[in-house]
């Protein structure tokens, strides 16, 4: 007798949701994707600011089974990455499975399946629910008094207005994370005055963005092994670098030395002092960039480290009472990484995910939750998002989910959820391993949950792939 195949509902058509869909499609399993926007690409659709790139080399930040010989740069620009995901979605026939412009208002596990209510009031029933919404899409707006009074243009970096003419404008960037740093060079080329408001200095590791020539791309097209070798090289490099953030030792020292030497290249001692962090490199997400300091040394670019007091119609007022007159203010203030996941997911015991996570997210291997049967999170809390290519992580996680789905199908109508003691054991191991990481050495970052515990993977990339290679079904309950 042919076994009944499970229906899967994937939430989010970004990098990990598309990947899950490809795996299911290849395995001949039914699925649909709910996507709040009107196109695929997730973070690469939402972010369009000037200078946007991915700080993971493109040959590594692409699906292993879908190499692209045509990357133009080591770190290719955002629109190229977005086009890559759109192409892949089309090639694998995923678009017909996506309900665009649709949100999820609630999902409840009842009667042996997930009952999912959409924002338009439709109901979807699916045995498996995969949350692929990602950690970095809810914008973090700073609470600065007077923001609504500003007479110029003020917007979050993820709300970039492509029509805005920046030439000759006095522009401010608030925030110096990866986003703020990346946009400085292109903005400096257009602005009459560019001011960066920095609350905390950042460590910057110098890595240039090499351009691939037409002839290099031709060779990679002809000899795909070249692309594969490049990918393996960067994978190895990132795997080694990931050791630097999770363990003290050679790689951490190497990271520190690279950052310190780079900082020393700032000639003006006053500027250098302002740019000097008071915490360990890697504690916040390390920024890879080689232009930032040079941009700050230009005459029309200013670094302000005084606290922002308020925003007035004409600009930003710092605590020293000075008004910085502006035409454009960009809030490069990041995302609320801890408002993780679909709102209002209610598990088998009537408990919502928000309630279960009242004191921080507590998963089993970052992918499943006790009490939430057949519910899987991609790039969920405690995934290795701060240290290795998130695509590499998702490839392993989606394979794991597919293994679970195959096993659930064999269980004839029963669902699986991790045993509470398995999740507790994993959490205890996490807490212990966090002690060796650089993330807890004394800085504030979006990595930390409200209790100050990093929601990252505290072991190496190699260990992640080993542990997640296949599910240990003994750690699950059948419901
Ligand atoms: P972020 O790293 O969270 O940085 C936010 C910045 O805004 C920080 O400098 C923060 O200062 C500042 N800020 C926040 N609230 C503020 C306030 N009220 N007043 C003044 N300053 C304030 O955000 P992000 O730069 O958007 O990057 C987020 C993550 O997105 C990155 O870590 C990365 O994972 C991802 N990303 C990746 C790439 C890539 O190339 N792969 C590119 C962009 C983004 P404090 O440091 O003092 O908190």
Image: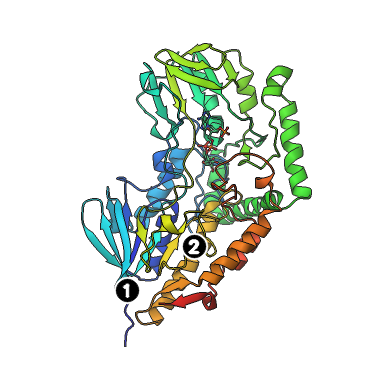
315 sits to left or right of 271:
left
Q: Which residue lies most toward the left here? A: 121
| Mark carried by residue 367 | 2
Q: Nearer the viewer, residue 215 or 470?
A: 470
Residue occupying the point 59% across, 65% down: 426
Q: Is residue 31 visible?
A: no
82 sits to left or right of 229:
left
Disc 1 or 2, which lies upstream in sequence? 1
| Mark carried by residue 165 | none
**Vertical relation: 268 (above or below) 106:** above
Q: Nearer the viewer, residue 420 or 327?
A: 420
Q: Nearer the viewer, residue 240 or 137?
A: 137
Q: Mark 1 and mark 2: span between their CA atoms?
A: 20 Å
Looking at the rendered image, the quarter that the N terminus falls into is: bottom left
Q: Is residue 47 visible?
A: yes
Among the 4 quarters of the image, the one containing residue 209 = top right
Which mark lies nearer to you, 1 or 2?
1
Residue occupying the point 44% across, 52% down: 15
Q: Secondary structure at mark 1?
A: loop
Residue occupying the point 63% across, 40% down: 286
Q: Secondary structure at mark 2?
A: loop
Q: Which residue lies most toward the bottom here? A: 1
202 sits to left or right of 165:
right
* Callout 1 crowding tier (Cα within 10 Å): few <14, some 14–19, many ≥20: some
Q: Nearer the viewer, residue 217 or 432?
A: 432
Q: Name the residue carrying label 1.
A: 112
Looking at the rendered image, the quarter that the C terminus falls into is: bottom left
- Contact check, label 1 and label 2, Cβ < 8 Å: no
Among the 4 quarters of the image, the one containing residue 295 = top right
């Amino acid at each position: 007798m042919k076994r009944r195949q499970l229906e899967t509902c994937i939430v989010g058509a970004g990098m990990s949701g598309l990947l899950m869909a490809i795996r299911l499609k290849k395995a001949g399993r039914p699925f649909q994707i709910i996507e709040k926007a009107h196109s695929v690409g997730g973070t690469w659709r939402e972010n369009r600011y000037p200078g946007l790139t991915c700080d993971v080399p493109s040959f590594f930040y692409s699906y292993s089974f879908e190499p692209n010989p045509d990357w133009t740069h080591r770190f290719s620009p955002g629109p190229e990455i977005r086009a890559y995901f759109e192409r892949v979605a089309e090639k694998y026939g995923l678009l017909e499975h996506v309900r665009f412009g649709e949100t999820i208002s609630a999902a409840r596990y009842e009667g042996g399946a997930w009952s999912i209510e959409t924002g338009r009031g439709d109901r979807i029933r699916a045995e498996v629910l995969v949350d692929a919404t990602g950690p970095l899409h809810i914008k973090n707006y700073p609470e600065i008094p007077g923001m609504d009074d500003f007479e110029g243009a003020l917007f979050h970096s993820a709300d970039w207005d492509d029509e805005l003419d920046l030439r000759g404008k006095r522009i401010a960037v608030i925030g110096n994370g990866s986003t703020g740093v990346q946009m400085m060079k292109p903005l400096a080329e257009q602005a009459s005055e560019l001011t960066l408001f920095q609350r905390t200095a950042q460590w910057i590791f110098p890595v240039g963005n090499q351009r691939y020539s037409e002839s290099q791309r031709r060779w990679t097209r002809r000899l795909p092994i070249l692309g594969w070798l490049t990918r393996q090289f960067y994978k190895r490099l990132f795997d080694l670098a990931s050791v630097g953030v999770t363990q003290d030792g050679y790689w951490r020292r190497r990271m520190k030395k690279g950052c310190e030497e780079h900082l020393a290249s700032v000639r003006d001692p006053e500027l250098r002092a302002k740019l000097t962090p008071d915490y360990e490199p890697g504690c916040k997400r390390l920024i890879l960039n080689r232009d930032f300091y040079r941009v700050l040394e230009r005459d029309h670019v200013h670094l302000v480290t005084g606290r922002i007091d308020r925003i007035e119609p004409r600009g930003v007022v710092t605590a020293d009472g000075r008004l910085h007159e502006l035409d454009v203010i960009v809030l490069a203030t990041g995302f609320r990484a801890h408002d993780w996941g679909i709102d209002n997911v209610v598990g088998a015991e009537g408990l919502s995910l928000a309630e279960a996570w009242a004191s921080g997210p507590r998963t089993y291997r970052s992918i499943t939750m006790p009490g939430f049967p057949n519910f899987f999170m991609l790039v969920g809390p405690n995934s290795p998002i701060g240290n290795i290519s998130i695509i590499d992580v998702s490839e392993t996680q989606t394979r794991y989910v597919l293994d679970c789905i195959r096993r659930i199908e064999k269980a004839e109508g029963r669902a699986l959820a991790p045993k509470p003691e398995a999740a507790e054991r994993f959490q205890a191991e996490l807490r212990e391993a966090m002690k060796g990481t650089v993330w807890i050495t004394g800085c504030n970052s979006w990595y930390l949950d409200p209790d100050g515990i990093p929601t990252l993977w505290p072991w190496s990339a190699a260990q992640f792939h080993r542990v997640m290679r296949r599910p240990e079904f003994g750690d699950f309950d059948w419901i």
